[in-house]
Image (cartoon, helix red, strand yellow):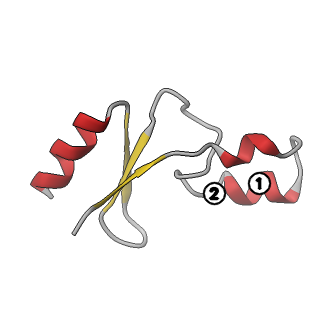
Amino acid sequence: MPEIIKRSFTALKFPKGSTPRNYYNETPEFSEYMPSYKYVVRTSKENCRTFKTKREAEDYALNH
């Protein structure tokens, strides 16, 4: 079942170029990139997709 996750942008809490920031930037839930995309739908461990609104994420999750 798909999981809807609100992005936290945790990477922004660490200095640029630091190991923790690089680590968090590897996953969409914590990445600093694409700040207008606030939600992630994870359908498997390796497969996820980002959305701007919770409604878009919910619609996608219902159909996948």
Q: Assess whether mark 1 and mark 2 are in contact (beta carbons under 8 angstroms).
A: yes
Residue 3 point in image, percent of width and height: 31, 61
Name the amino acid, label 2: Glu
Q: Secondary structure at mark 2?
A: loop
Name the amino acid, label 1: Asn
Residue at 53% x, 51% y: name it. 28
Q: Residues within 10 Å of mark 2 (few under 14, many from 20)?
A: few
**Is 38 left, or right, of 9 in this rendering?**
left
The residue at which mark 1 appears reads as 22
Q: Secondary structure at mark 1?
A: helix
- The answer to whether residue 51 is above or below residue 64 is above
The residue at which mark 2 appears reads as 26
Residue 13 point in image, percent of width and height: 79, 43
Res 8 → quadrant: top right
Quadrant including the C terminus: bottom left
> Which residue reaches farthest left?
63
Res 54 → quadrant: top left
Res 45 → quadrant: bottom left
